[in-house]
Amino acid sequence: MNSALPPFKVFSGTKSQYMAEEICKDLGVELGKMNIQHFADGEFEVSFEESVRGCEVYLVQSTFPNSDNLMELLLMIDAAKRASAATIIAVIPYFGWARQDRKDKPRVSIAAKLVSDLLTAAGVNRVITMDLHADQIQGFFNVPVDHLYASSVFIPYIQSLKLDNMVIATPDVGGAKRANSYAKYLDVPLVLCHKQRAKANVVANMTVIGDVEGKNVILVDDMVDTAGTITKAADLMLEKGAKSVRALATHAIMSDPASENVDNCGLAEMIFTNSIPYSGPSKKVTVISVARLFADTIRRVHCHESISSQYLFK
């Protein structure tokens, strides 16, 4: 690192320490010391156990449920600001609340915008995140956002499988743009699934648009919650004559009964990144680390270098 640049330090929230430790190992630095004290009523207090005055501070914390993870990150930002950190960068591998990104019916909140406002109000100077549910969420922030893509680790993994007659598929029309990028890069056909929801997390019916007979299908999505959609899509494609079906998704939310759904469906493999820690029982799940991707981004941001060369496609 350039000695003319300000020193930088990496700290971690409680639930993302596994990620921060991997990032620090790749950067060749020690994870910063901080203390989170919990009180009897459920409140907690964040304190840095070393000076951050004049430092570039990277705070690693995904904001998956429960909301304590988000609150912890906000308190970390505020504590760093009040301790005279020069720059505060929130490293958020999984940006929670992102599915509420617009008013899709009357009298609802836009939670993604609210969370971005909270982070800005707390004092964040930059955000590094990965595979937002909708790209336009970057525009909710009034600070720079470095938006990474899990395709940087997924594409090499797909290529290592050496599958013939491969097609890329999306479990819903909303993910068509993402899936099309994979299909174009790999030079394979694209298949769409059209779904109709009965209510949140419940799919009423689904239709496959495209030919999957005799094909090795790769389903692409940004997150898996209860796994209802992606497992229904996999079973439907097998019914339509697919040779095999694998699925990859950046964020493993995996709310119950997701692991059971994955095990009981026809998926050959379910591939995630470690943006959210997965400790479920499913033997079909493969987890690929993105710590090196984030470490490289931190290195580039610190040295004022472009990060666009990390993108296999945009």
Image (cartoon, rainbow, N blue to C red):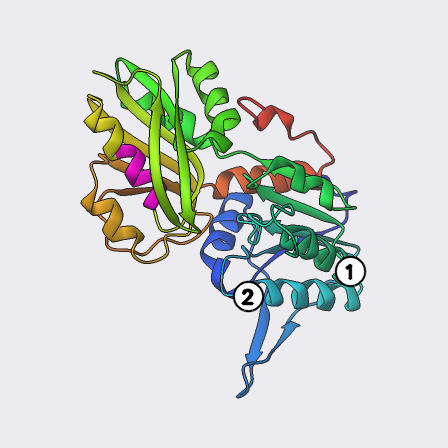
Q: Earlier in the sequence, mark 2 or mark 1?
A: 2
User: Is 229 above or below relative to 38?
Assistant: above
Residue 119 at x, y percent in the picture? 71, 57
Looking at the rendering, which quadrant does residue 269 occupy? top left
Question: How many C-alpha atoms fall within 10 Å of the one at disc 1: few (<14), some, or many (≥20)?
Answer: few
**166 or 144, nearer to the observer:** 166
Determine whether label 2 and label 1 are within 8 Å by CB.
Answer: no
Within the magenta stretch, is there residue 314? Answer: no
Within the magenta stretch, is there residue 229? Answer: yes
The residue tagged with tag 1: helix, strand or loop? helix
Which residue of the protein is positioned furthest toward the bottom in this rendering?
Answer: 40
Q: Is residue 289 left or right of residue 54?
A: left
**182 or 87, nearer to the observer:** 182
Question: Which residue lies under the disc numbered 1?
Answer: 121
Q: Residue 288, can we see it?
A: no
Q: Which mark is residue 59?
A: none
Q: Amino acid at mark 2?
A: Ser
At 36% from the left and 44% from the top, the residue drawn is 203
At 58% from the left and 48% from the top, the residue drawn is 98
Question: Which residue lies under the disc numbered 2?
Answer: 67
Q: Which residues are magenta?
A: 228-234
Residue 56 at x, y percent in the picture? 73, 52
User: Is 253 above or below relative to 236?
Assistant: below
